[in-house]
Amino acid sequence: MSAMAVEFKEDYLQAYRLKSWLLTTDHKRIGLLYMATITFFFFVGGAAATIMRLELMTPKGDVLPSPDAYNRLFTMHGVVMIFFFLIPSIPAVLGNFLIPLMIGARDLAFPILNLLSWYVLMIGGSIAIGILIFGGVDTGWTFYTPFSTMFSNTMVVPAATAVFIAGFSSILTGLNFIVTVHTMRAPGMTWFRLPLFVWALYATSLIQVLGTPVLAIAVALVAVERLLHVGIFDPALGGDPILFQHLFWFYSHPAVYIMLLPSMGVVAEIVPCFSRRPIFGYKLIAFSSVAIAVLGFLVWGHHMFVSGQSMYAGMIFSFLSFMVAIPSAIKVFNWTATMYKGSVRLDTPMLYALGFIGLFTMGGLTGLMLASVAIDVHVHDTYFVVAHFHYIMVGGAVMGYLGGIHFWWPKMSGRMYSELLGKLSALTVFIGFNLTFFPQFVLGYLGMPRRYYEYPAEFQVLNVMSTAGASILAVGYVLPLAYLLFSLRRPPDAGPNPWRASGLEWQTDSPPPVHNFEEIPIVTRGPYQYSPEGAEAIDGNGDDASR
Amino acid sequence: METVTTHRASGPPAAPSDEPILEVQFDDLEQQHEASSVGMWVFLATEVMFFGGLIAAYAVYRAISPSEVALASQHLNVGLGCLNTVILLGSSLSMALAVRAAQLQSRRNLLWFLAITAALGACFLGVKAVEYYQEYREHLIPGWNFQIPAQVAAKSSSLPLDPRRFEMFFVLYFFMTGLHAFHLIVGIALVSVMALLTWRRWFSGSGETQIEVTGLYWHFVDVVWVFLYPLLYLIDVQS
Amino acid sequence: MWNFPLFPDQASTIAKHVDALYFFALGIAGFFTAMICVLILAFAARYRRKSTADRLNPPTASRTLEIIWIGGPMLLMLTMFTWAAILFYKMYDPPVDALEVYVVGKQWMWHAQHSEGRAEINELHVPLGRPIRLTMTSQDVIHSFFIPAFRVKQDVLPGRYTTMWFEPAKIGRYHLFCAEYCGTNHSAMGGWVYVMEPVEFQQWLSQAGTGASMAEQGERLFVQYHCAGCHRGSQTVHAPRLEGVYGRPVPVQQGTEVRFTLADYRYIRDSILRPKSEVVAGYEPVMPSFEGQITEPDLLKIIAYIKSIGAKEATQ
Ligand code: HEA
Ligand code: HEA
Ligand code: CUA
Ligand SMILES: [Cu+2]
């Protein structure tokens, strides 16, 4: 029980008063504040999804009182899940917690700004919850005009405000990370010694900083048109509805990489650690993160193949969409190659990471089918698209997030969780997920449009399967919440480095002291210096800790 | 990972009073200075995209309705716009001098230049307010009291013109200049705070970093105006 | 209960081409997914911690491998792209002899109008084996006209015309959906498309209709809205004759220059709703705007009339 040998020290969790949390500028504590916030929003969004799936069990609308109720549900589901859960998820929780630790700094460059960005998110989130309580909004998360500006009689302006505000939180976080990575690396921590997680978050931050303002402008213009009835997007007033779609997707396509890149970063940490060998093709993975961020800005038009934009524009966007797949492909192949000649152990984080690779591959490849213009004409705005993005965002990004939480939980809390329950949850999520969303590919190609409250009877069986899957998925998500919280009842037992991982963050105590390192380390080697020889030692430790 | 340790991490020694204060997260002043200026540059990149989105929307409407935009633009006061451009360029000069003064630790000059900068910024806002008032008098504020001006209505019988696009120009005009004015208000507040802090000798150094970063922001706001002015005021003045 | 469909009908000529591309893409997706999964499972088993497999000299980067897995997918994707783009082009470009149908979407119904005059709601009757071209617009928000069995879909926008075409290849009844979210009853905005034998279709067209073709109805409206007063040789107003305008380049005054614009649906629509935006060279802009006075279906009828007098002149 080497873990118990760690003597008691002043760690960052020591002060318990509420005020010490609400006024903290410690990046680790702010990470935990974010974690609580987004977990809450995840379950809000998940509850909406649960009710939607119940409604969709039968072809006729019978669970919910009206189509409007359904429309509000999927809108809130999308808005909450995207803007208040997935976009802040890994960057604001794990990124906040880990970036300073990984690069050997005492904190982020601007700690107060960091706290501010949490408050900003809370303000946006409170508005979102307020909307949910006081009537909802029914435009879909895409806010397409002129429906949103002139026709919807729900709370569009508050919703636009909530998104606008949340956007600033995202910008501030990105800004903080960029500056931190540029200026605060420990001595010897060169760019090519950075962990790939940091590279991924650096690329993510670029998108946050450069993309989010355009979203802010788009929703601000929606609010202006709605409030003043002046024509910006509504053709009846002389506006152009397609312009809104361009502005919206100019942000929202890059935004999907805000959601995905961090998960890719997590996987790049987990796979080498549990394969006990250096990552394959470090530089190429690092560059492909940046390449995805850059190319991601050039493909937004693939959401508009049938919107009435010109045919040639469609073809160019199609071509560029294929090009973004290249860096993703590089990453998938390199992770897989990393397991070759490794010494593999399937602990919970690894199970989640491998689940990520498989499901992301499926989601990404179906994305390529969507990018093939002629196919997209048929499957645009059907459940095929719904399945595509859930495969990437739930199967990919959320799996990656959970993998990361399981990987770094010992560091964050100092405690191990039950390995058995962990594995069970990973398996449940994987099975439930596929049962929920695979049938939706079939439904989509059959032609079932999305955002449908009622649907033709012949689609029922597949929908029932999907609903059944969602209930399994729900169990899979509640489980970690339960056992991770439960693990907090025990004294810290994880030890500084339960996985024998190589990153700087594992050199300090678990939980880390207030300013992270007793002494700032000097870095002399690149990341991922694993070798199979070290494996036995970990076996002993890992097994102990998981009791 | 093998590591050797050197630096003590537990905070720097208490700063002597004429040295700038070092925040705990930084190793040394140089790093702190670099973080501030990189931070401001990244922030300005965000701002560029912010105005960029608007300018893209503007470009689209100008492309699809050039004559309305040109006609509407003639209802702006080019003279006052020009005056404002000169004022802002002047303020940029004094801001640059302020930064220089801070670097040279010349507190008196610094105070003066900051005051001039803020005053010029305020002048700009004053002129802008006069312009807005004129436009209000001419019923050019969309969503409030908008009316197609009589001479335009008269002309429109002989000119191809869509009144809604005419109005849209003013939507964009007020949105863009309003956003710019808001940035300028923030800028004036920043400069005033810097001046106040300098005056009260709050900075333990000469506040070099802070003044420099404020300067970056100020120049950015000026540059935005340098783009807005020709885009909005100088369309087709000859015709 | 268990005989639910897993694959949509192939009821248009384009459907089997789209499906072929789909299966090709599916094949690629299946292959790579299977490959990745098999490799992961195989590595996890072979190199599990307890195994004694050979672990000497694990590669940490390999130029050749990386070139292969950039180049291979790149080639496959170029194939997919080219195939899809060519097919898309075909789906975009209607044959000239297509039958014209006009569609207006509004919250929450579809209104379709055949050139022969018969109109229908939430249904669309079409003959087998004839290319059909739809000209569509919306009266309020964006909708999307979607017939899964035909593999076609096109957004329908307010304030402008979009078109799509297909050629039915199988007799039957197929779903018609609205695929762009448009408010409360989005999911109820749909109906059926009937593909009929051409003979039956002709019968159907002549049943119960007004008897007047769309152009004839348009002509009536042309008189009713007093267009005829100016456009049929008025003494007091100098207005262009509209015979033969459709499909021709029209000289339009732009400041001091004259520019030619093709007189298509968009042009004629704009000429009626916003006459001042494009004034024919040599005329005074005295035509009043009819914005808000003519409904979208009526507008389409008037355009059909103007189009028909173009055709008449051409055949004379
Ligand atoms: C995290 C989120 C995320 C991510 C990463 C992606 C990634 C991709 N997406 Fe997806 N997408 C969404 C979220 C996401 N998407 C959402 C939310 C929508 C719907 C929005 C709405 O309308 O509400 C959407 C919609 C959407 C559309 C529009 C569909 C429509 O509405 O009609 C398209 C079309 O091109 C598309 C394409 C792609 C492509 C090509 C990628 C690529 O980046 C994928 C690249 C990855 C791979 C390709 C897999 C790995 C590669 C290999 C294993 C090698 C394999 C070999 C070959 C390449 C041959 N997406
Ligand atoms: C991060 C993004 C994210 C995530 C994680 C999810 C998660 C899920 N989504 Fe999500 N979804 C979107 C983003 C996301 N979705 C977006 C952007 C849209 C488009 C919206 C639009 O069209 O505008 C969409 C749309 C969408 C639809 C299509 C609606 C339609 O078009 O009509 C469906 C239908 O099945 C669905 C289902 C699900 C399910 C079953 C989950 C599951 O994974 C959820 C699992 C979680 C739980 C089940 C929670 C578990 C906890 C509990 C059950 C406790 C509940 C507590 C109480 C009831 C008190 N989603
Ligand atoms: Cu019409 Cu959806
Ligand atoms: Cu996209």
Image (cartoon, rainbow, N blue to C red):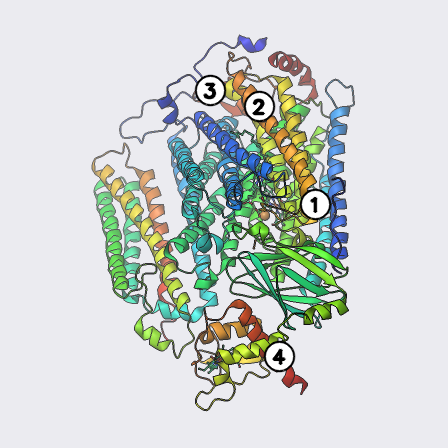
Q: Residue at x 40, y 18 (%)?
A: A16
Provide residue B26's location: percent of width, then percent of height: 41, 29
Answer with mark 3 or mark 1, whichever residue precedes in sequence.
1
**Would you say the residues marked 1 and 4 are in contact, meaning their CB atoms lie under 8 Å apart?**
no
Q: Which residue is mark 3?
A: A519
**Would you say the residues marked 1 and 2 are in contact, meaning their CB atoms lie under 8 Å apart?**
no
Tag 3 and tag 2 share a subunit: yes
Q: Is residue A96 visible to the viewer in this orientation of the structure?
A: no
Q: Residue at x 37, y 71 (%)?
A: B71
Q: Which residue is mark 4?
A: C308
SS label for mark 2 = helix
Kindly identify the amino acid type of the residue bearing the numbered disc 3: Glu
Q: Which residue is mark 2?
A: A480
Q: Is residue A110 visible to the viewer in this orientation of the structure?
A: yes
Residue found at the far bottom of this picture: C235
In this rendering, the count of numbered labels is 4
In this rendering, position of residue A139 left or right of residue C164: left
Q: Which residue is mark 1?
A: A458
Tag 2 and tag 4 share a subunit: no
